[in-house]
Image: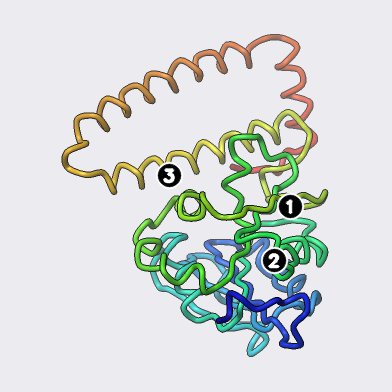
Amino acid sequence: MQGKIDWKNSKEKIKVSIIISAYNEEKNIKRIVKTVLRSKLFAEIICVNDGSTDKTLKILEGFGNKIKLISFKENRGKSYVMVAGVKRAKGDIILFCDADLTKIKKSHFLGIIQPLKFGFADQVLAIRESDLEPFKKLTGERGYFRKDLLPHLKKFEKTKFGAETYLNHAFKNKRTYWYFEKGLVQAGKGGGTFISQVLCADKYLKEGYEILSEIIRQKKPSQTKEVKKIVKRINKTYKYYFSLLKKFLTEKDIKQIWEKDIKKFKNIKD
């Protein structure tokens, strides 16, 4: 069986597929695909356009037969497009990669592939630079054996959002290898300035909302009352923390830092 092959000592060459999901990533998609192509690590590069309304699809089409392109007219959600990529893939190892990364390089890909190839892990999660402790588990850069993903595709496809949360749960009892190397930064989520950290937190909050929405969507009828109580409690907690944040940002010293960063990064948008 494929899963019992000793890849380290086997003469059989392991094949790796990379799946890049993209939604309105016209500013980043060309760079990430070029980096993947230059690495020469992958048997196939599968790019999935998730109903983008910008030039993402046009840019991907420009790569011609260098990539395998899947495109949806409407936004289907990250889990759905990831599953579409897995169904199309032929590789023994599947590497998922977000389209909004900066400074990613060949060594990052190797750091995800090798622990699987040499039998150290069943899932590999790449920690992004500046990732906060609770959010490192939500990394989009991760690797699996295709055979291990196949039994989960039907449920995984229906999750829409919260793709990483689902995979973390599905593989919670499997061997997990955490990989970190400097330079793996997600656009809009990295940097050491005060404003970039605020923007980072904002994006994480939006992702948290998507995950929470997905959990609520999948709730069982018998849990409706309990879910409503939890949502009310979360809403109350967020209001409290935002009131503290507002007070914090009006302090004179913090305001000065904020204004300084605004001048330096005046082109940053949400």
Q: Nearer the viewer, mark 2 or mark 1?
A: 2
Which residue has dot 2 on it? 119
User: As shown in the figure, which amino acid type bears the numbered disc 2?
Assistant: Gly
Q: In this view of the protein, which residue sits in the foreground, 92 or 251?
A: 92
Of residues 175 and 21, which is closer to you in this image?
175
The picture quadrant where one finds residue 146 is bottom right
Relative to 97, residue 235 above or below: above
Q: Earlier in the sequence, mark 1 or mark 3?
A: 1
Which image quadrant is residue 65 in? Answer: bottom right
Q: Is residue 135 left or right of residue 170?
A: right
Q: What residue occupies the far bottom of the structure in this picture?
A: 65
The residue type indicated by label 3 comes to Ile
Q: Nearer the viewer, residue 239 or 162?
A: 162
Coordinates of residue 111 in the picture (x, y in percent): 77, 61
Q: How is the image coloured?
A: rainbow
Disc 3 element: helix
Q: Residues within 10 Å of mark 2 (few under 14, many from 20)?
A: some
Q: Is 226 placed above or below 127 here?
A: above
Cα–Cα gap, marks 2 and 1: 15 Å
